[in-house]
């Protein structure tokens, strides 16, 4: 699957209730203030808390978080961040094709050939492909699948699928259940002396535990180049607090906005995925609801997982947002940086108030310093994920990527801002630190080169154990208790010309890792297989 570089979140944020806010400053004239933002945040909407009048320039996106600036805008206009506008990506005469649901679980292609997948073309017929020979020139034969893996293999595959970074140990759920029942039957006499198995309460407790450990181990069928969506949904499905809310959320289709319809369909999908008797789901309704809001996803072309994540979280937030718009933020320049940060955050949370924001949003501190007079300006902006660059070495640690993210850079030449004290454009330095850490930290590894059409295959060694990632050294203030635990990974295998997305997720009950490859869910995966050159988006929970 060819990777489409992110178009940026400014498109999705344009409507009311957007989580990203709008760029602004506190200075007039040429002194527009220093700008910063995390990946997916375009500013703090008049809440930049900008002081001392530097002109706003070189946003965080300018640090090179997007490859799209090197691609044609697909007929759409280019925003100030260099991203194509979603509203103009398609002509007004665009008609969405309807797709009929598929009743079988065969992984053969229907209504399309692998050539159309490799070329990035959309599926023209009203049928879709359950799964595809992602990088091959021919389709798979027709192996028949059980609930969690291959049950009967009709014939051998002509071409192997992309190599997964994890062992290929897929569950045969029916046979596993049969084995489990046989084991229970053969050992019933040995267990009869235990009160746990002699009482109905003990039996129900044991059955409940088994059900809880199987809930969420549900595959998602690929309905035509949708592995990017399936991977992200699996990672969000294993975000404990989000799923806990969605399992009890009951909305309505009637009189719902487009964002509310996306939330409704997502909650319905999560509830189905976390039913122990359900093992495979087709996310067609969610795809249609999301495409109705974000029309660049209306076809079945290949897309970027991180870009989809930004738009998707924006829609969930907008559907739940109870914030009040219209208030202007004014901050005294004489206040301390921490006080400015607190006031900016309070203003932002009054405007953008939802559970999604509570879980995923942090706050960045951007510091701009004039090299001539030493005058300093600070800006505080929300971020929903950190898009970190990769060093040139073939193997590195995640800390090296984070160091590059917060490193001090020089703004010179055309990038020079205007210093309010010098009253002219001056060479400045700019750096980032994290003022406020989110509950769930999403780290995007920028694998797609900004200078050439290629993918970086660096192996980034990231912490995988509980409380293994300590972000204290990247904070604006000294804090030794900023520990995170890894719980999900979105993997991309392949290149910019073609590839495939999968997900690795840690089950919240069994604490075992599983690989989700579209409709196939693997047995438990060792932590030794988590780190690979395929890791693209990392999901951490603060502990």
Image: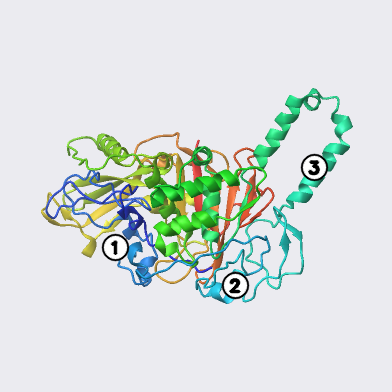
- Find disc 2 in the rendering and name its residue: 111
Point out residue 8 in the picture as x, y percentages from the top left corner. 37, 59
Name the residue located 40 percent from the left edge and 62 percent from the top edge.
Answer: 295
Inter-mark Cα distance, 1 to 2? 37 Å
Viewer-proximal residue among 543 and 153? 153
> Which mark identifies residue 180?
3
Inter-mark Cα distance, 2 to 3? 39 Å
Q: Callout 3: 10 Å neighbours few (<14), some, many (20+)?
A: few
Residues at circles 2 and 3 in contact by the CB criterion of under 8 Å: no
In the image, taking residue 30 as reference, residue 202 lies left or right, namely right
Viewer-proximal residue among 433 and 223? 223
- Above or below, 530 relative to 4: above
Point out residue 253 in the picture as x, y percentages from the top left corner. 45, 48
- Above or below, 120 relative to 468: below
- Find disc 1 in the rendering and name its residue: 79
Q: Is residue 169 visible?
A: yes
Callout 2: SS: loop
Point out residue 385 in the picture as x, y percentages from the top left corner. 41, 49
Q: Callout 1: 10 Å neighbours few (<14), some, many (20+)?
A: few
Of badges 3 and 1, nearer the viewer stands 3
Q: Callout 2: 10 Å neighbours few (<14), some, many (20+)?
A: few
Sequence-wise first label, 2 or 3:
2
Of badges 1 and 2, nearer the viewer stands 2
Callout 3: SS: helix
Of badges 2 and 3, nearer the viewer stands 2
């Amino acid at each position: 699957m060819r990777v489409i570089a992110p178009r940026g979140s400014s498109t999705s944020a344009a409507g009311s209730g957007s989580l990203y806010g709008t760029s602004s400053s506190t200075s007039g004239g040429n002194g527009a203030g220093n700008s910063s933002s995390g990946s997916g945040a375009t500013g703090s909407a008049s809440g930049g808390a900008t002081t001392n009048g530097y002109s706003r320039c070189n946003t965080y996106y300018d640090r090179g978080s997007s490859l799209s600036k090197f691609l044609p805008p697909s007929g759409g206009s280019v925003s100030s961040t260099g991203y194509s506008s979603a509203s103009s990506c398609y002509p007004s005469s665009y008609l969405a094709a309807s797709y009929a649901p598929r009743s079988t679980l065969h992984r053969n292609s229907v209504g399309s050939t692998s050539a159309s997948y490799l070329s990035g073309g959309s599926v023209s017929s009203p049928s879709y492909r359950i799964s595809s020979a992602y990088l091959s020139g021919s389709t798979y034969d027709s192996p028949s699948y059980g609930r969690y893996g291959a049950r009967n293999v009709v014939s051998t595959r002509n071409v192997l699928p992309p190599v997964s970074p994890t062992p290929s140990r897929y569950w045969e759920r029916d046979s596993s259940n049969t084995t489990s029942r046989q084991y229970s039957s053969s050992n019933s006499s040995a267990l009869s002396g235990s009160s746990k198995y002699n009482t109905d309460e003990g039996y129900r407790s044991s059955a409940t535990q088994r059900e809880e450990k199987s809930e969420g181990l549900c595959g998602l069928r690929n309905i035509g180049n949708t592995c990017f969506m399936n991977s992200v949904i699996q990672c969000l499905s294993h975000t404990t607090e989000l799923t806990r809310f969605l399992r009890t959320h009951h909305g309505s289709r009637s009189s719902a906005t487009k964002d509310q319809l996306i939330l409704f369909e997502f909650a319905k999908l999560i509830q189905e995925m976390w039913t122990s008797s359900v093992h495979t789901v087709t996310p067609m309704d969610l795809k249609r609801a999301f495409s109705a809001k974000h029309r660049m996803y209306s076809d079945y072309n290949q897309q970027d997982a991180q870009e989809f994540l930004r738009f998707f979280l924006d829609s969930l937030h907008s559907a739940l947002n109870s914030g009040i718009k219209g208030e202007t933020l004014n901050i005294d320049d004489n206040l301390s940086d921490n006080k400015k940060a607190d006031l900016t955050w309070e203003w932002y949370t009054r405007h953008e108030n939802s559970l999604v924001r509570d879980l995923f949003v942090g706050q960045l501190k951007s510091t701009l310093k004039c090299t001539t007079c030493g005058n300093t300006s600070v800006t505080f902006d929300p971020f929903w994920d950190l898009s970190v660059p990769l060093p040139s070495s073939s193997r590195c640690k995640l800390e090296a990527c984070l160091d590059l993210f917060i490193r001090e850079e020089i703004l010179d030449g055309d990038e020079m801002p205007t210093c309010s004290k010098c009253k002219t454009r001056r060479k400045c330095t700019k750096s980032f630190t994290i003022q406020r850490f989110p509950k769930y930290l999403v780290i995007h590894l920028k694998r797609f080169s900004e200078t050439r059409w290629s993918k970086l295959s660096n192996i980034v060694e990231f912490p995988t154990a509980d409380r293994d990632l300590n972000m204290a050294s990247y904070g604006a203030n000294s804090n030794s208790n900023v520990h995170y635990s890894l719980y999900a990974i979105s993997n991309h295998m392949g290149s910019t010309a073609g590839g495939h997305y999968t997900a690795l997720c840690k089950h919240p009950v069994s604490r075992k890792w599983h690989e989700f490859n579209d409709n196939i869910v693997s047995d438990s995966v060792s932590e030794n297989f988590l780190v690979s050159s395929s890791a693209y988006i990392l999901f951490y929970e603060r502990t």
